Amino acid sequence: MFDMFKRLLDSFFNRLFKGKKKAKLGLYGPPNGGKTTLANKICQDWLGEDMGTTSPIAHETREIQIKEQITIKSKGKELTFNLVDTPGIATKIDYEDFLKYMDAKSAKKRAKEATKGVIDAIKWLDDMDVVIVVLDATLDPYSQVNITIIGNLQARNIPVIIAANKIDLKKASIKRIESAFPQYKVLGISAKFGTHMDEFYEELIKVS
C-alpha cells in the first residue's frame, strides 16, 4: 500500500512540474562566428543587458554561459527560454595560435580552457531543446567543424536554425550555407547591427 501511494505521489508531482521546465536554447558554432554577439543582441533586445564578452581572439568564451528567463515576442506569440551560449567548437586547439596575442603561459592556459569548453559544449547538447548554429557567412561552410556540429545535431534530432551571421560584410553568402545544409532553415543576420532580427525571432518561435 505504501509503495502504491508513493508511486501515485511521484506521478502527481511529475505532472505538476513537467510543464514548468523552461526550454533551453543553445548557441553553437565554430569560434568567432558571432555566438556571443548574437547572445548579447538577444539579451539587449529583451532584457536590456549584455550576456558575455566578445573579442577578435578565438575562444574568448571558454565556459558555458546561461541567461535565464528570456521572453521574446513576435506577431502576437511569445517564447520563454533559458539562453545558453557555448564555447566555440573546434577539432584542433593549438596554444601556438594564441602566441601573437599573449605570452606562452597565458596561451597554454587559454588552449587548455578552450579544449575543456569544447568538451562541455558537446555534453550540453543533450540538454538542448532548440539549437541556433551561428556561422560566419563570409567563410566556406564545408569545414570539418561545421560538419561535426551538424552531424551531432542530426543524431540527436534537435530542432535547428542556422544563423548565417555577418551579412553586413561583402564576402557574405547565404546561398553557400543553404547549399551546404539544405535540411535546415538558414537565416541571414548581422548580430552586430541587428539586421533581420525580427525575422530571426519569428522563426525561433515557430521552430520551438
Image (cartoon, helix red, strand yellow):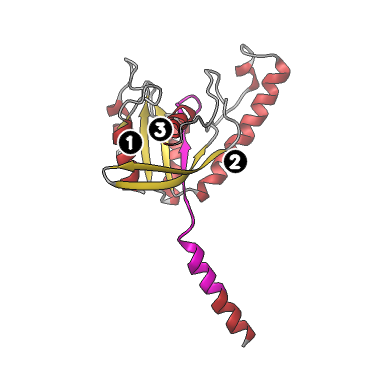
Distance between the alpha carbons at the discs numbered 2 and 3: 27 Å
Instruction: Name which residue type carries label 3.
Output: Asp
Residue occupying the point 32% across, 25% down: 195
Is residue 136 shown left or right of residue 188? Answer: right
Which numbered circle lies on residue 68? none
State the SS at label 1: helix
Magenta segment boundaries in residue numbering: 10-34
Q: Position of residue 114 (x, y in %)?
A: 61, 30
Q: Residues within 10 Å of mark 1 (few under 14, many from 20)?
A: some
Q: Which residue is under mark 3?
A: 45
Q: Residues within 10 Å of mark 3 (few under 14, many from 20)?
A: some
Give the farthest residue toward the bottom: 1
Which numbered circle lies on residue 200? 1
Instruction: Name which residue type carries label 2.
Output: Asp
Which numbered circle lies on residue 120? 2
Front position among marks 2 and 3: 3
Is residue 1 shown left or right of residue 67? Answer: right
Can the viewer see residue 183 in this picture? Answer: no
Q: Along the polypeptide, which appears first: circle 2 or circle 3?
A: 3
Along the viewing direction, whichever of 49 and 145 lies nearer the viewer: 49
State the SS at label 2: helix
Is residue 81 shown left or right of residue 169? Answer: right
Q: Position of residue 127 (x, y in %)?
A: 52, 50
Q: Residues within 10 Å of mark 2 (few under 14, many from 20)?
A: some
Along the viewing direction, whichever of 45 and 1 lies nearer the viewer: 45
Q: Along the polypeptide, which appears first: circle 1 or circle 3?
A: 3
